Image: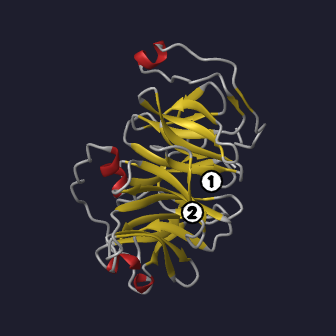
Amino acid sequence: MNGKTITKALTIAGLTGVAALLTGTAAHASTATHGQTVTYVRGGVIYRSSGADEVRLTEDTVNARPRFSPDGTKLAYLHDGTVWVMDADGGNKHQVSDRKAGGPAWSPDGRTIAFAALSCTGGPGVFRGGPNDTVEPLFPASCRDQGVPAATESAPAPAAADLVGRLRTDDAVAWSPDGTRIAFRGGECESIADNCLSIGSVATGRERAIDVYGGGNGTSGFGVVPAWRTDGQKVAWTRYDADGTAVAVTEADVDGSNRHMVGKADDREMVYEGTRTGMLTAAYNGHSWITAVDLATGRRTPLHQGSQPTVAA
């Protein structure tokens, strides 16, 4: 299985019964045939699907934030809070970082992985490393000549009971398609803001905040789980405005301008399938579902029960 696109068509043939929901098996909102290979999480287990059927990739229930490699042959993911890599069919699982981290992202050449972890400042930072690389700090830039802090064993913070609480500290990162920039939660902007989302230059370490909360601007909320459109011209992220009504997906130019909402309220964690389709987590029948959204028309196709989607190129 090479994860290459067979077809981009989405066809809806009908609805399945509710029995699958009651038994906890993989329930499908439709018999939609989606040629793109999608991987996602349900109950801490990572699954892969390229149609109505799905394959379980992890045996245990402590996994999160899978991301396909650019060639679709591997997945980086969090296993019990640390970065691991496995083959796209679930084989050859191995750890690539010994420190607690946020959701990883592959470089466009597939040679290294970026992830967020504790930096030399004692606050969050972004590192790169991978199966064949030594881990090195990228952000903040002031940590680049300080070496890598020792991995520490600390008791995990209690998981938030609500979705907003869980997303607030989600440190998933996203690498731009041209390899020059990384989007991540936090950054230098946190010296003047309560929460922010930044884009940093891999070459220079220079950062630019694209979503800022607090710091005198009168807003309270956060922006997390960024994703780049495949042409590198747009960035999307999951946004929560405490003065608003719900979590939602925002899309904008890479400088944060021309922003608009994608999908519906309570949508989150969108990744791009090309430039015309978003794959996101949506609320459906009282559960989280992987849902394909036509970015031009808004047409929605629920595919599988689960969250945290990633799509093979």
Q: Nearer the viewer, mark 2 or mark 1?
A: 2
Q: Residues within 10 Å of mark 2 (few under 14, many from 20)?
A: some
Is residue 309 left or right of 244 when viewed as pictured? right
Residue drawn at (69%, 19%), measured in percent from left and top?
13
* Residues at discs 2 and 1 in contact (Cβ within 8 Å): no
Is residue 242 left or right of 307 when viewed as pictured? left
Q: Can residue 120 be seen in this view?
A: no
Q: Name the one closer to the observer, 43 or 225.
A: 225
Q: Name the one closer to the observer, 307 or 221.
A: 221
Residue most extreme to the right: 7
Residue indicated by mark 1 = 69
SS at mark 1 in the image: loop
Q: Residues within 10 Å of mark 1 (few under 14, many from 20)?
A: many
| Picture colour scheme | secondary structure
Task: Please determine whether, in this image, residue 196 is positioned above or below residue 243.
Answer: below
Mark drawn on residue 259: 2
Q: Name the one closer to the observer, 115 or 33.
A: 33
**Residue 228, x across and y down, in percent:** 61, 60
Mark drawn on residue 197: none
**Residue 199, x across and y down, in percent:** 52, 72
Separation (CA) of disc 2 from disc 1 = 28 Å
Amino acid type at mark 2: Arg
Is residue 46 left or right of 279 when viewed as pictured? left
Q: Name the one closer to the observer, 12 or 258.
A: 258
Amino acid type at mark 1: Ser
SS at mark 2 in the image: loop
Residue drawn at (34%, 75%), measured in percent from left and top?
193
Task: Please determine whether, in this image, residue 17 is positioned above or below residue 172.
Answer: above
Number of disc labels: 2
Q: State which quadrant residue 151 falls in.
A: bottom left
